[in-house]
């Protein structure tokens, strides 16, 4: 039977970052295999993402993860260089702009205090300052806004994933095109991965980086995780009027819009009954754009009354039903099966810190750089939450 020290299920951004961080660590000399069921990556979240990074979270651990993420993104060319080829993921450091009415002002202010305490460069702006800084913005109903002056923006998410993958391969990580059907378990240990054709690959440690399929894969090992698969759509458009330096703007009702090459992208997450769990449903619902998104953004930015809609697509969020944050690490009953599931829409920017954290768990059995233990899946069983309030 083939044996690897580490088998990673899922070769998109999380799996490839973990693979790179393992292979580049001088304290690790093991063999790593990444299993990827769809090497075209057409449907994975990493390829369909809005690929933006922000420091404006409400939990300390997420802010620290993004502070590392931005440092990594700024240096990605050097860190992931292969044979003189430095990846360029086109980082646009244009910031996020979270807006609040009176109802949301206190939460915005609390979050801002924490972000600044931890070293994020976020400005708290009163309506007058908002109107001066963003003259195209309608501020009449607003009480305040928070703007990321540096350290926030967007990048080529697919490019980041491929850069991790290419670097990992250059360091000896093997990628195989195959679907993991189940995790083999014996006497409280994960022993290997069974492929669809019945072949079993033995493994010292297994990492579940299978995105929206994470819950199903974990279930084959007897681990139940509260991950719900939700459809999220992105709509593109061009504006007839020029909008200078549009950050990633989040309206108080949760609708977002940001610049993108020569146009804009926007989206919104429905809730409750309008946001069912999905499976193999990548259809775009244009009513969402017509009935909710466009009216919102055209009220917030009057120039967006004159736009030309373009392409649109749908992808999946792996939502953590427990507290909207990733479940990272092992459950005590299966210590060599590491979960990285439930990113809840912020997993691309978390890939550098999460991949590094996973590699440290494999090599040292503890976090050595950034302590991510708050995100342990054990919190679900203990009834402890790390609730992220800023979900976009
Ligand atoms: C519309 C949209 C907008 C988003 N915007 C942002 C954003 O602005 N910023 C941000 O940080 N994040 C954003 N996200 C979230 C982010 O894209 C994801 O959290 C992140 O890409 C998750 O990466 P992953 O590698 O864990 O999962 P995925 O990218 O889903 O990859 C999982 C991989 O595992 C493979 N796989 C699954 N099951 C198996 C199996 N059994 N065997 C073998 N392979 C398997 C899949 O084929 C896939 O390639 C967005 C997501 C979407 C959909």
Image (cartoon, rainbow, N blue to C red):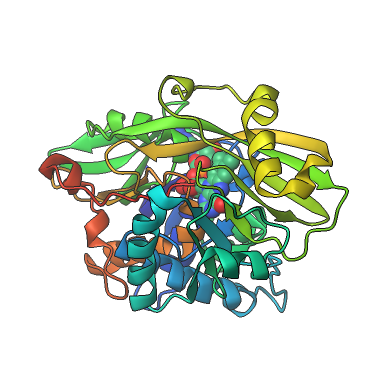
In this view of the protein, can residue 36 be seen by the observer?
no
Which sits in the foreground, 321 or 350?
321
For residue 152, which quarter of the picture? bottom right
For residue 83, side relative to residue 21 (left or right): right
In this view of the protein, can residue 235 be seen by the observer?
yes
Taking the spot 40% from the left edge, 38% from the top edge, the residue there is: 319
Q: Position of residue 153 (x, y in %)?
A: 61, 64
Q: Position of residue 282 (x, y in %)?
A: 62, 26
Q: Position of residue 12 (x, y in %)?
A: 54, 49
Taking the spot 48% from the left edge, 77% from the top edge, the residue there is: 121
Q: Is residue 177 above or below residue 130?
A: above
Q: Is residue 290 above or below residue 175?
A: above
For residue 244, side relative to residue 361 (left or right): right
For residue 86, side relative to residue 32 (left or right): right
Q: Is residue 382 above or below residue 96?
A: above
Q: Position of residue 108 (x, y in %)?
A: 40, 59
Taking the spot 84% from the left edge, 41% from the top edge, the residue there is: 306
Q: Is residue 68 above or below residue 13?
A: below
Image quarter where the N terminus lies is top left
- Numbered-mark total: 0
Taking the spot 40% from the left edge, 56% from the top edge, the residue there is: 105
Which sits in the foreground, 350 or 84?
350
For residue 76, which quarter of the picture? bottom right
Which sits in the foreground, 164 or 7?
164
């Amino acid at each position: 039977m083939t044996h690897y020290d580490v088998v990673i299920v899922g070769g998109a951004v999380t799996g490839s970052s973990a693979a790179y961080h393992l292979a580049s660590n001088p304290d690790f000399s093991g063999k790593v295999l990444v299993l990827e069921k769809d090497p075209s990556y057409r449907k994975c979240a990493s390829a369909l993402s809005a690929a933006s990074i922000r420091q404006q979270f409400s939990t300390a651990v997420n802010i620290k993860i993004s502070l590392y993420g931005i440092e990594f993104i700024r240096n990605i060319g050097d860190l992931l260089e292969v044979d003189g080829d430095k990846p360029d993921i086109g980082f646009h450091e244009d910031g996020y702009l979270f807006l609040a009415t009176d109802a949301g002002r206190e939460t915005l202010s609390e979050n801002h205090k924490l972000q600044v305490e931890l070293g994020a460069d976020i400005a708290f702006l009163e309506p007058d300052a908002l109107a001066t800084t963003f003259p195209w913005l309608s501020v009449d109903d607003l009480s305040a806004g928070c703007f990321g002056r540096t350290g926030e923006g967007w990048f080529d998410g697919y490019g980041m994933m491929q850069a991790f993958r290419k670097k990992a391969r250059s360091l000896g990580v093997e990628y195989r095109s195959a679907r993991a059907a189940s995790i083999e378990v014996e006497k409280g240990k994960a022993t290997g991965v069974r492929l669809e054709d019945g072949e079993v690959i033995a493994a010292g440690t297994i990492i579940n980086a299978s995105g929206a399929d994470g819950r199903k894969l974990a279930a084959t090992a007897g681990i139940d995780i509260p991950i719900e698969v939700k459809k999220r759509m992105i709509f593109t458009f061009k504006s007839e009027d020029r909008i200078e330096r549009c950050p990633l703007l989040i309206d108080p009702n949760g609708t977002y819009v940001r610049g993108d090459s020569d146009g804009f992208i926007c989206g919104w997450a429905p809730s409750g009954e309008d946001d069912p769990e999905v499976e193999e449903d990548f259809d775009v619902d244009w009513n969402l754009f017509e009935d909710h998104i466009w009216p919102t953004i055209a009220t917030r930015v009057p120039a967006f009354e004159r736009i030309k809609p373009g392409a649109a697509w749908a992808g999946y969020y792996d939502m953590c039903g427990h507290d909207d944050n990733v479940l990272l690490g092992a459950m005590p009953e299966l210590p060599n099966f590491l979960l990285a599931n439930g990113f809840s829409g912020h997993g691309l920017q978390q890939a550098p810190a999460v991949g590094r954290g996973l590699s440290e768990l494999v090599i040292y059995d503890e976090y050595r750089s950034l302590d991510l233990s708050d995100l342990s899946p054990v919190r679900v069983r203990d009834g402890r939450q790390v609730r992220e309030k800023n979900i976009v």
